Structure formats: structure tokens, C-alpha cells
Amino acid sequence: MRFNYKLSRSARRNLQEISDYWMTEAGEGVALRIATDILETIITLSSQPRAGAPAEQFGEGVRKFAAGKYIIYYRLRPPRAVEVLHVFHGARDQRKAWLGEAKL
């Protein structure tokens, strides 16, 4: 059963920041590949939304799933939607990343 997916404002901002970083560091091709890989993983999650591990320290029903070196945080929303909350690099302190986003 396929779910729809929605990117929160924070997730869209995270993806833009990731793309901007890689555009500056490695060029358009690398930035496009990384962004595409993350988005393809989100599409995959829409067909397997329970594939991620619980991450309820960040809120009720929050789950996480790896996309390469990045972690996608999401939750299921009725009736059949995957809401992507954030996308952070796995090397970041995840708690600080969440707290930093909460201040914006």
C-alpha cells in the first residue's frame, strides 16, 4: 500500500541546505545525486513507511531511516501519509540538530 509523502517546511529547508553545501563543495552533479538519493529514499518510505526505526525521543510517532550518510526523520499521518520532518547528516549530533531547528 503506497502512502503519500509530504515534506515539512523544515525538511525542505534541510534539503536546500544539503544541496547548497554540496553544490559549493563538489559541484552540481554531486549535489543533484545526493538530493536525488534522499528523495528516492523518501519515495521508497512512502511504500514501506514502517521500515524506519522508532525515534520517539524527538516526538510521538517519529521514526528515522538512513539515506546514505543522511537520516530522514518522519512520522505517519492519517489517513495514509508520510510526513518528512527533517533530514540531517548522520555525523551531526542529532539532538542538537533537532534543538537548533526548533529555534528557527
Image (spheres, rainbow, N blue to C red):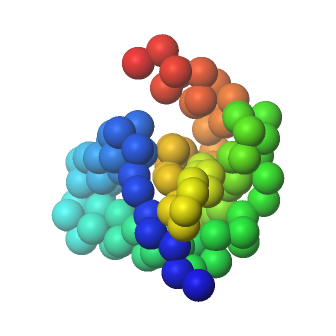
| In front of the other: 24 or 48 | 48
Residue 40, x across and y down, in percent:
43, 75
Toward the bottom, the furthest residue is: 1
Q: Eyeballing the image, is 43 above or below 58?
A: below
Toward the front, the furthest residue is: 79
Residue 4 position by quadrant = bottom left
State the residue at coordinates (57%, 57%). 78
| In front of the other: 87 or 50 | 50
Position of 63 with respect to 15 (left or right) is: right
- The answer to whether residue 33 of the structure is visible from this angle is yes
Residue 69, x across and y down, in percent:
58, 60
Can you say which quadrant of the picture contains the C terminus? top left
Residue 76, x across and y down, in percent:
61, 57
Q: Eyeballing the image, is 77 above or below 33?
A: above
Position of 27 with respect to 15 (left or right) is: left
Residue 34 position by quadrant = bottom left
| In front of the other: 27 or 58 | 58
Position of 49 with respect to 22 (left or right) is: right
Residue 81, x across and y down, in percent:
51, 62
- The answer to whether residue 41 of the structure is visible from this angle is no
State the residue at coordinates (79%, 34%). 57
State the residue at coordinates (72%, 47%). 61
Toward the top, the furthest residue is: 103
Question: What is the tally of numbered marks visible in this picture?
Answer: 0
Toward the left, the furthest residue is: 28
Can you say which quadrant of the picture contains the N terminus? bottom right
Q: Eyeballing the image, is 86 above or below 5?
A: above
Q: Eyeballing the image, is 93 above or below 21?
A: above
Residue 72 position by quadrant = bottom right
